[in-house]
Amino acid sequence: MAVYNVKNPFIAHLKSSKMLTSPESGKDTRHYEIDLSGSGMEFLPGDSLAVKATNCPDLVEDLLKTLKLDGDTVVTSPAKTEKSLRETLVADCSITQPEKKFLKLLAEKAGHGASEWAGLLEIEKKKELADYLWGREIIDMVEAHPVAWEAQEFVSSLKKLNVRLYSIASSLKVYPEQVHLTVATVTYDSFGRERKGVCSTFLSDRLDSSTPIPTFITPGKGFRLPEPEDETPIIMVGPGTGIAPFRAFMQERKATGAKGKAWLFFGDQTRANDYLYEAEWGEYEKDGVLHQLDLAFSRDQDHKIYVQTRMKEKAAMFWEWLDAGAIVYVCGDASRMAKDVDTALHEIIAEQGGKSEEEATAYVDQMKKDKRYRRDVY
Ligand SMILES: Cc1cc2nc3c(=O)[nH]c(=O)nc-3n(C[C@H](O)[C@H](O)[C@H](O)COP(=O)(O)OP(=O)(O)OC[C@H]3O[C@@H](n4cnc5c(N)ncnc54)[C@H](O)[C@@H]3O)c2cc1C
């Protein structure tokens, strides 16, 4: 099998893309099909694709103007190659989120001018610094502190542009030599400027079929399906883009004639605008690959309904499946969803299994040890 990694990525190309959310949605979530022809790349459902994006050229131009630097100046990039400052900022440097090295240098250069935030660079002020920086990017910091920069000095103060990971939403058994992704485009306004997530807007705005997309596979540690002949039931909890690996799971289980039952919890804001891959789940139900589907659209009624609300409504059945040895997979938002789902899981086990809080915790700990509670959250 061909081995690709950050130093030796496979250069893939976009095959097609389409909107998954409607124009009325509060979100912009898209489906991407990426051509891997000739790569020999192999992956399993549960793996992720690493994508090395480039920065928005308009942001680079704004930054050059603010820094009063000539984009044609030759510099040594973090990749240790000599190229123009402009190319280096587009391809190799993290130019949005301000990191400590850059901030320390800026504080030094700006002197008193930086007193509002420079004191937050001490280790113990991590939270305060993160709060201060929320919504602020490097361009805001250089604009607020108009000091003179050398091109190389600026580049050297920045971190390397990192890859972003995306859960793979397709099975090689159904779509050989391609990979599908489900990506929420990150855009927001802050401090009077329109902001764009680097990689999600690279995919949504700056790609055509000829644009090189450097990629490689990151294995999904433990986020694996049971063998097809294994009758262990699976419960998948994947609101929002957390649905991605479960689309791959369903494709794989249909292709392999997997024997176990499957239950999916999906949720998002509204059914009309945010029901990702709606038609496909109905097909999997018809095909007998998906046995139970529960949906939670938080904004379709006065009170908020989330996937964990649905889990608790179906607590008796959830416990029956757990008792039959079901594996629980959770994918998606780490900041709130994963915690709320974890709390609901504990509550279901305590209530339905007649267990104390401590016993429910011990049950969940045992599930983790037995690899029956697997999370891929971000
Ligand atoms: C294992 C794994 C699997 C993943 N799978 C998927 C997937 O299937 N689909 C998917 O869409 N994503 C997935 N992600 C997330 C993905 O890797 C990226 O983090 C995401 O696309 C954002 O990257 P970006 O480069 O577009 O944004 P970035 O340039 O990284 O910007 C994001 C940052 O912008 C800031 N920010 C965002 N919103 C605001 C706001 N409103 N106000 C102020 N600041 C804000 C935050 O600091 C945030 O960290 C996955 C992550 C991991 C680790």
Image (spheres, rainbow, N blue to C red):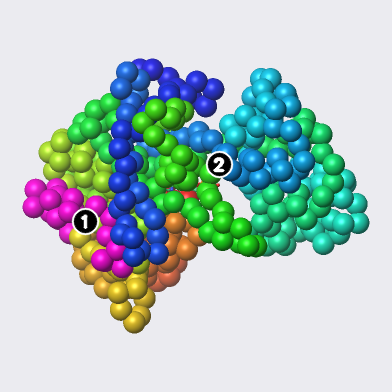
Q: What stretch is highlighted in magenta?
A: 270-292
Pick whichever of labels 1 and 2 is earlier in the sequence.
2
Residue 229, horizontal then vertical, whole percent: 15, 37
Q: Which of 292 and 357 is in front in this view?
A: 292
Cβ of mark 2 under 8 Å from ligand 1: the answer is no
User: Was residue 271 drawn as part of the magenta stretch in this picture?
Assistant: yes
**Does 273 lie within the magenta span?**
yes
Judged left or right of residue 98, residue 328 is left
Crowding at label 1, few (<14), some or many (≥20) Cα neighbours within 10 Å? few
In the rendered structure, which amino acid carries the disc numbered 1? Glu
Query: SS class of the residue under badge 2?
Result: loop
| Residue 41 vertical position relative to residue 282 in the rendered view, above or below | above
Q: Position of residue 100 (x, y in %)?
A: 74, 46
Whole-number angstrom distance, CA of label 1 to CA of label 2: 32 Å
Q: Residue 11, located in which quarter of the rendered image?
A: top left
Residue 126: x percent and y percent?
72, 56
- At 30% from the left and 74% from the top, the residue drawn is 300
Q: Name the residue under label 2.
A: 56
Image quadrant occupied by the N terminus? top left
Q: Is mark 1 within 8 Å of ligand 1?
A: no
To which quarter of the image does residue 118 belong? Answer: bottom right
Residue matched to label 1: 278
Q: Residue at x 57, y 56 (%)?
A: 194
Vertical position of residue 322 compared to residue 173: above or below:
below
* For the residues bearing labels 1 and 2, Cβ distance under 8 angstroms: no
Circle 1: element type: helix
Q: Identify the residue at image location x=64%, y=59%.
A: 134
Q: Identify the image quadrant of residue 193.
A: bottom right
Q: Label 2 is placed on what type of residue?
A: Cys
- Dot 2, how many residues are within 10 Å of its Cα: few (below 14), some (14-19), or many (20+)? many
